[in-house]
Amino acid sequence: MIVLGIETSCDECSAALVKDGQEVLSNKISTQIEFHRPYYGVVPEIASRKHLEWIYPVVESSLNKAGIGLTDIDGIAVTYRPGLIGSLLVGLSFAKGLAYAAGKPFMGIDHILAHLYAPHLEHDISYPYLGLIVSGGHTIIAKVDSFKSFKVLGTTIDDACGEAFDKVAKHYKLGYPGGVEIDKLSKHGSPSAFHFPKPSLHKGSHTYDVSYSGLKTAVINQLDKFWDGSSEKSVENIAASFQQTAIDIIAEKVIQAANDTGIKKIVAGGGVAANSYLRKVLKRNSGYDVIFPSPVYCTDNGAMVAGIGCRYLEEGEISPLNLNAEARVPRFRRI
Ligand code: KG4
Ligand code: ZN
């Protein structure tokens, strides 16, 4: 079974072909980083216009790389929620048109489920497990029961983890994407140079919820109020101290959830799952089975969409052609 997967929920325009849910035949990713870099963040209008320009050649080159034609595929999967609405609509409309014209089954895929599926491309993983999705738009700890169902145990009450990396980087003009630059700078800095606060959440917050806005503000205030150019206050030290605190916040909650639920298998995904300190700190806890995707499958990619698309197709879960894009998903329910 071969499925074409299309991903345009944010700023990566990607198309991939995956066989039987695991064998990646091609995974083309056209990144828009250079167009958003001057703004230190994704500009939605630029993103959707670039997707419009690139979607056809990206899909075509994905088919060429795999050496197959449209007639050889069994179905078309596409991200339809959540994400930037203009960006989602480009991929969704394209996928629907292609599926209709080629007479192939069409499957709308939830972006969080696709990120959760990404590690399955490279590993045989049984359910249930604790899923950790950390990206520019999401911070979720979930009990994952199957490729299409999960229950949220904890989430951020304000900024997403990757968003905090991006905003700190923007403020210090460290480069874009912020998470990647902070990860690199941290290797040359001391994580104990600054003591940034971890949040204490108010009563009524869920046990596994996290918060990033206080940390973000504290780090930014170092620049606004106290910056004196001294070597101790180097950007490398700021980056390393921020990174350690930001990652410890979420890593501690995942370990706590693993201990409380007795589910000792932790599977990570999303752009921040590429972070070198997160990978180190979670794997350091030897009592847990921790699985990370390769970095290329952490950030947005078509392969994870095509992979989960194979599972949907196997189960006959086909979407109607009037499926609409959704920027947000009001679906999270806790156990
Ligand atoms: O999954 P993704 O490509 O898009 C969303 O669905 O949001 O994640 C992008 C996010 C950005 O915030 C980026 O700064 C962050 O992932 N990121 C990282 C690293 N690589 C990407 N954050 C920390 N360390 C990294 N190595
Ligand atoms: Zn994503």
Image (tube, rainbow, N blue to C red):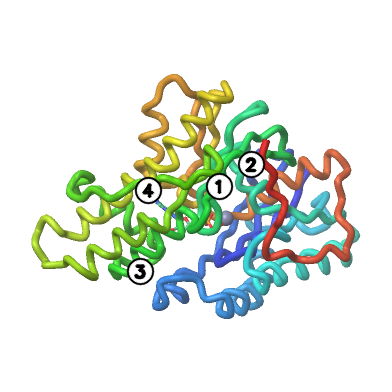
Give the percent coordinates (x, y) of residue 213: 42, 58
The mark nearer the N terminus, 4 or 1, is: 1
Q: Residues within 10 Å of mark 4 (few under 14, many from 20)?
A: many
Residue at the image position 41 percent from the left and 21 percent from the top:
286
The picture quadrant for ligand 2 comes to: bottom right
The residue indicated by pointer 3 is: 170
How far apart marks 4 and 3 lie (CA) works out to: 16 Å
Give the percent coordinates (x, y) of residue 5: 70, 54
Residue 134's disc is: none
The residue indicated by pointer 4 is: 246
In this picture, residue 188 sits left or right of residue 279: left
Q: Residues within 10 Å of mark 1 (few under 14, many from 20)?
A: many
Front one among 304 and 151: 151
Q: Are marks 2 and 1 in contact (CB under 8 Å)?
A: yes
Q: Residues within 10 Å of mark 3 (few under 14, many from 20)?
A: some
Disc 1 is placed on an element classified as strand
Three-letter amino acid code at disc 1? Thr
The mark nearer the N terminus, 2 or 4, is: 2
The mark nearer the N terminus, 3 or 2, is: 2
Three-letter amino acid code at disc 2? Val
Quadrant of the snapshot with the C terminus:
top right
Q: Residues within 10 Å of mark 2 (few under 14, many from 20)?
A: many
The mark nearer the N terminus, 1 or 3, is: 1
Front one among 93 and 69: 93
In this picture, residue 124 sits left or right of residue 201: right
Residue 155's disc is: 1
Residue at the image position 40 percent from the left and 43 percent from the top:
249
Q: Are marks 4 and 1 in contact (CB under 8 Å)?
A: no
How far apart marks 2 and 1 lie (CA) works out to: 7 Å
Three-letter amino acid code at disc 3? Lys
In this picture, residue 231 sits left or right of residue 295: left
Disc 4 is placed on an element classified as helix
